[in-house]
Image (cartoon, grey):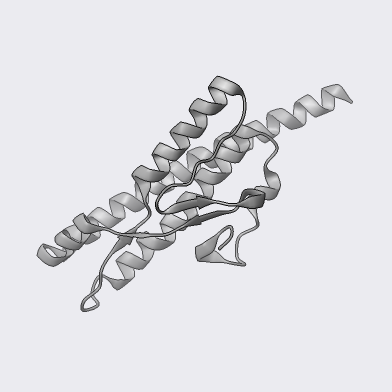
Amino acid sequence: MGNNRFQEGTIMNLQTLATDNITELLLKIIEFTQNRQEIIIQNIKSAHNCNFVPKDMPVEEFSNLMNIALFEHALNQRLLLCDGRHIKFGANGTIEITPVIDAQGKLLLEKDRNGFLRAQITKLMENTLNQKIATEMLRQKQSQNTRLGRRLN
């Protein structure tokens, strides 16, 4: 699957904005958080369904892969995106992410549905903050590149 797997056709292809390594990493973070938002919202909507099993994005795996990419960028000024168990980077900036079962969420849902919903809302707020930070950093980087381009012309 390609970019924006969970909202296909409703969000522009973010990779068309990539111009350098840091921009591409910010775009990956934005895409990951957009997809995670959809999963968390689905968890909240489905919490009252019988036999529902909550899912999440592989957050720790994604974080580790981004750390490896940042290390490689700092060391060699190149972007090296390594695949993980649930995350595959493809050609032209595509990324395929397979959601995973949220084992802790499943246990909490079985014991305390309201606690589960509170935990999902907390995840949603944290995810939204991460998305806003990455989006703002991207906006500032693009603004900086635009100003630099004007000075060169």
Q: Quadrant of residue 153?
A: top right
The quadrant of the picture occupied by the N terminus is bottom right
**Farthest residue, direction left:** 111
Q: Does residue 79 appear to the left or right of 82 in the view shown?
A: right
Estimate the x, y position of residue 22 in percent, counting from the top left: 59, 33
Estimate the x, y position of residue 30 in percent, counting from the top left: 52, 47
Which residue is pictured at 42% across the width and 44% down the height? Answer: 62
**Farthest residue, direction right:** 153
Q: Does residue 134 appear to the left or right of 120 in the view shown?
A: right
The total number of labels drawn is 0
Q: Relative to the observer, which residue lies in front, 50 or 100?
A: 100
Q: Does residue 17 appear to the left or right of 81 in the view shown?
A: right
27 w.r.t. 44: above or below:
above
Estimate the x, y position of residue 72 in percent, counting from the top left: 53, 27
Which residue is pictured at 53% across the width and 65% down the height? Answer: 7
Q: Does residue 58 appear to the left or right of 87 in the view shown?
A: left
**Farthest residue, direction bottom:** 50
150 w.r.t. 127: above or below:
above
Estimate the x, y position of residue 14 in percent, counting from the top left: 63, 51
Which residue is pictured at 50% across the width and 41% down the height? Answer: 82
